Image (spheres, helix red, strand yellow):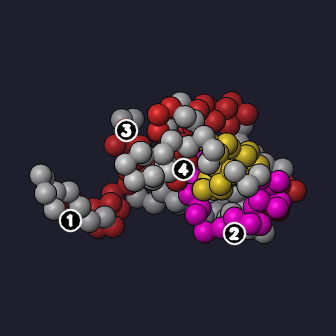
Amino acid sequence: MDFLELAKKRYSVRQYKPEKVEKEKLDKILEAGRVAPTGANRQPQRIIVVESAEGLEKAGRAAKIFGAPLIFIICADTSETWVRPFDGKKLTDIDASIVTDHMMLEAASLGLGSVWICRFEPEILRKEFDIPKEFEPVNILAVGYAEGDPSSPDRHAAARKPLSGTVFFEKL
């Protein structure tokens, strides 16, 4: 399957089968995050893997995790994040999101479903998982075997704006 085919096939899964994700698949997902590019190759990502019932319950206090048997809490070490010198922009969110995207697409390539979660209470995550103040929780990625019928890869024709609505050549 080529990349565009994989990207169109992936969809946000909001209901999971209870079966665990195999260690070999977990390791491949983590490797995809490890090799993701980051600003100035600083690699500020810090990933908390949560797959125990107790850990998933703790995560569920901060966010709706849709019954996923595995989640990743993707944090960024703000002391290691590259800062653009011209305006002081920290790449914290960008780096963590690139890592999350690589992991999400690797999960899809392995036949797993996922949903990217940004609606969570950071302070609850910090407390439940002892996240130090210099580590910013940026994303949660829920992963597992999807329950129910997958979304059609053809849905993008109607659900997405045409290229002419988002792409401009030379000026806006």
**Element assignment for label 1:** helix
Q: Are marks 3 and 4 in contact (CB under 8 Å)?
A: no
Towards the viewer: 1 or 129: 129
In the rendering, at what x and y percent does residue 123 appear?
74, 66
Which badge, 4 or 1, is on the more N-terminal residue?
4
How far is mark 4 from mark 1, CA to CA? 28 Å
Q: Which residues are magenta?
A: 108-131
Which badge, 1 or 3, is on the more N-terminal residue?
3
Q: Is residue 108 visible?
A: no
Magenta stretch: includes residue 156: no
Q: Amino acid at mark 3?
A: Phe
At 12% from the left and 52% from the top, the residue drawn is: 170
Relative side of 172 to 156, left or right: left
Q: Are marks 2 and 3 in contact (CB under 8 Å)?
A: no
In the rendering, at what x and y percent does residue 166 appear?
23, 61
Residue indicated by mark 1? 165
Residue indicated by mark 3? 3
